[in-house]
Image: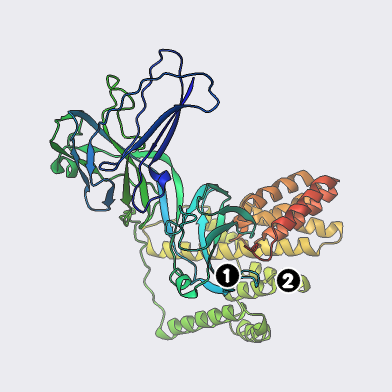
Amino acid sequence: RLLVLHTLQLLPNNAYRDAEEKKYFRLMPSQETVSSIAVHAGITCEMDLARYWSAQGRTKVTASVRFRGVTSVPDSITMLCGGGGGKVRLHSSLADEFVLPKAALKTWLRPLSPVKAGVIAPCDERDVLTFNSKQIHQLVLEYEFENKEAGSFTPRAPALQGVLYEAAFESQMMLIFDEDKRNIGVADSWPGEIKAPKGKITIRMQIRHDEIKKLELLKHLTILIERKLGKDINLSVYRNREAMVTAGAKMGRALIRQGTNSSVFFGEPEVPDPCQCGDILIGSATFEDGSSTLPGTGKRPGGTDIRYIVGSKAKEEKAEKAKIPEAQDNRTEDEKMNEVVRSAKVDYLKKLSEKKEDSEKFIAIYQTLASEYPDHLPLLVEGLKFHDNKDRREDNLPKVIAYADNVIAYVDENVLAGHFGTKHDEEDAENCKVHKDSEEKKGFLIEALARKARAIADSQSTDSSSDTFQQALKHLQKWEDTGSKKYAALTLEKAKLDGNLGSRLKLLTELLENKGDDTKDSFAPMTKAEIVEERKKVLESLSFAHLKERQEKWSIITSNKDYAPF
């Protein structure tokens, strides 16, 4: 027979559901069952036990109620970083009780402030109150955070959520977007978990009210990002403060006599790596011993709330590297000053290359400096980067090759190979200086070879130019492993020339997974849009029309120019 148990306590300034329990029991004749329900002391508890509406026939049932348990003071526990831990006083007012305190932190909260103060604006002209025609306004807040790994989170606004008809504001709604401005979830008064990809996540929150002054109070509202910890953090429990601060003997099972008190101390937890200062770890603590000789669960259902405020972490001590000995500088003061002046000129030239409108100035100053310092490699590399810039390289591919050859010509590869062919003396100052200079020259050489190979690939139109690219690539491979994502542009070109469309598609798919971030620091970074376009070309070459069509449709979904409106 199906029976229903319903209990209710009315708490001030709380919805009735906060102290309501409803349980169902499917019982056979003469069957006995026990259930535990949390109650609040000093407040009337209404209890109803009846058969379910669809259960037929008369039902005779006997019920007995027993109040038991210990009271914790305070009724929720908050521990601060550096506070040593937390203390709770347990009081048994009903009977002798055996306790075996346990506590675990299971959830991780991170406070999140708006990117900027919220914007208040009137809603649609139809959003007016019917009885006085007063315009309803909206406050829009925007939050951003970096989701380092794909996973789930729950956005929470404790000041507004958890209420409906009794809410102080008309409504609140959160729209969650990924870095492509694609809507991945919605949250309202009772938010649920949102599955989010890796990358930047944006939360846009709308709060509505007819009074602007009330909305202005929330222009800097902080919300919380809630995640489940990968593994529960169990807290150590002690009988006294001395044991807590010295990590002494743990507390075991203990008896609290009726009318007496006992103290329990919780030690600070080991904070997981992703947490940072200001984060909150929350969980629950139970005190009653769940012995099999006691009826029911023997514990307060759900336990007692416990939270820990994360503080700043100690800086990790890094192993000190051996100091590189400095060689004696025998140059004159004029020579030192000339080097400083030359470096300042190159730095200024580098700033000019960042703006399109300064292109003519760059060319004029570069020509002057090139005649003054014809063999200064940092200067020659800046000229190469300028012409190989994505905004102007298509019209300057021959120049890119020429500038790259100029850099390569001023690097003596035989001397460089001889240096790296032997181990340098790390204790000899002069040898360390030579090694540092050689490392710099090697970096310039590799960059020039990579840019030259790419320029040849983009300008090739005949079989002979194809051979030239292969030669340039082999030249680069003498000095660097081109199998990494850093040289993805060259790997793609080689696969294209070799007719390896499958390899090309595989690499593009791998790059697309991280949206091109693997090439961010390379000489030829690729954006997500560029990777998608190249991938569509490969799919077309493979006659995979259905996959190309899917890619085009998906590109429309992930290429939003603005966020979806509320």
Residue under circle 2?
393
Residue under circle 1?
131
Find residue 344 and report its horizontal and vertical position in percent. 50, 82
Between 235 and 400, the one nearer to me in the picture:
235
Type of colouring: rainbow
Q: Give the vertical position of 566 relative to 377 (above or below).
A: above
Q: How far apart are the two marked residues, 1 and 2, measured between alpha carbons? A: 65 Å
State which quarter of the image contains the C terminus: bottom right
Drawn side of residue 168 relative to residue 278, left or right: right
Drawn side of residue 147 relative to residue 288, left or right: right
Identity, as a three-letter code, of the amino acid under mark 1:
Phe
Q: Determine which quarter of the picture holds residue 291.
A: top left
Q: Give the vertical position of 341 relative to 27 (above or below).
A: below
Residue under the point 66% across and 48% down: 510
User: Which label is found at residue 1?
Assistant: none
Direction front: furthest residue: 58
Identity, as a three-letter code, of the amino acid under mark 2:
Arg
Find residue 446 and report its horizontal and vertical position in percent. 61, 61
Can residue 479 be seen in the rendering of this structure?
Answer: no
Q: Determine which quarter of the picture holds residue 91.
A: top left
Secondary structure at numbered mark 2 = helix
Between 564 and 40, the one nearer to me in the picture:
40
Q: Determine which quarter of the picture holds residue 229.
A: top left
- Which-is-in-front pick, marks 1 and 2? 1
Q: Reading the chain from its start, which is encountered first: label 1 or label 2?
A: 1
Can residue 165 be seen in the rendering of this structure?
Answer: yes
Drawn side of residue 546 relative to residue 232, left or right: right
* Structural crowding at the residue carrying mark 1, measured as other residues with C-alpha within 10 Å and reported as few (<14), some (14–19) or many (≥20): few
Find residue 377 and report its horizontal and vertical position in percent. 58, 72
Drawn side of residue 98 relative to residue 556, left or right: left
Between 85 and 497, the one nearer to me in the picture:
85
Find residue 211 and report its horizontal and vertical position in percent. 49, 73
